[in-house]
Amino acid sequence: MKGLKKKRRIQVIALAVVALALSTGLIGYAMRDGINFFRSPTEVLAEPPRATEVFRIGGLVEEGSLKRGQGQAITFNVTDGNGIVPVTYRGILPDLFEENQGMIGTGSYVNGVFEASEILAKHDETYMPKEVVDALKEQGVYVEPES
């Protein structure tokens, strides 16, 4: 009787471990498309991602680079002080989007151009996304805003 209880307990534990591993694997598989990694323009230029990879890029909109095309086509450059990546976007930009301001775009890097599917802009004169601040600090070009 004792041997049967011990054997049953081991079977239950083994089944629980297998179920946990399987559920962890399924959750990871389901989330693989929902995870977007952040990259600075310098990182994108140093190691260009695959054209099928969706990621976020952030930095400052380069002054003089914002051009509005026909319809809703917009092109501009994003920079972190060292690297400059051209960006194209089809859609309506956020109201606070402008040159020399922080932005984050989600999309893919295809043939040397970041094709954005979403653009996020700062929400006031002092805000800049944390990832952009960190990238600018790494480059040594970040200046603390005056209060």
Image: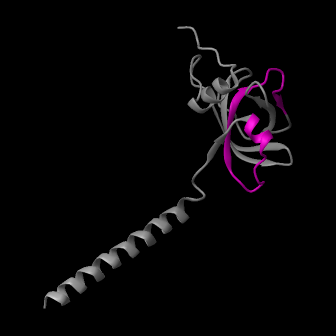
Q: Give the quadrant of residue 81.
A: top right
Residue positioned 49% across, 67% down in the render: 25
Q: Give the quadrant of residue 3.
A: bottom left
Q: Is residue 16 left or right of residue 54?
A: left
Q: Is residue 1 above or below residue 59?
A: below
Q: Judge whether residue 51 is colored magenta.
A: yes
Q: Position of residue 20 (x, y in %)?
A: 39, 69
Q: Is residue 22 left or right of residue 125?
A: left
Q: Is residue 101 left or right of residue 144?
A: right
Residue positioned 85% across, 44% down in the render: 112
Q: Position of residue 74 (x, y in %)?
A: 80, 35
Q: Position of residue 142 (x, y in %)?
A: 65, 19
Residue positioned 59% across, 14% down in the render: 144
Residue positioned 37% across, 72% down in the render: 17
Residue that extends furthest to the front in the rendered view of this protein: 3
Q: How is the image coloured?
A: one colour
Front in this rendered view, residue 8 or 78: 8
Region in magenta: 42-68
Quadrant occupied by the N terminus: bottom left
Q: Is residue 138 above or below residue 34?
A: above
Q: Judge whether residue 67 is colored magenta.
A: yes
Q: Give the quadrant of residue 23.
A: bottom left
Residue that extends furthest to the left in the rendered view of this protein: 1
Residue that extends furthest to the top in the rendered view of this protein: 147
Q: Is residue 126 above or below residue 44?
A: above
Give the mark count: 0
Q: Is residue 77 above or below residue 26?
A: above
Q: Position of residue 49 (x, y in %)?
A: 75, 50
Front in this rendered view, residue 143 or 63: 143
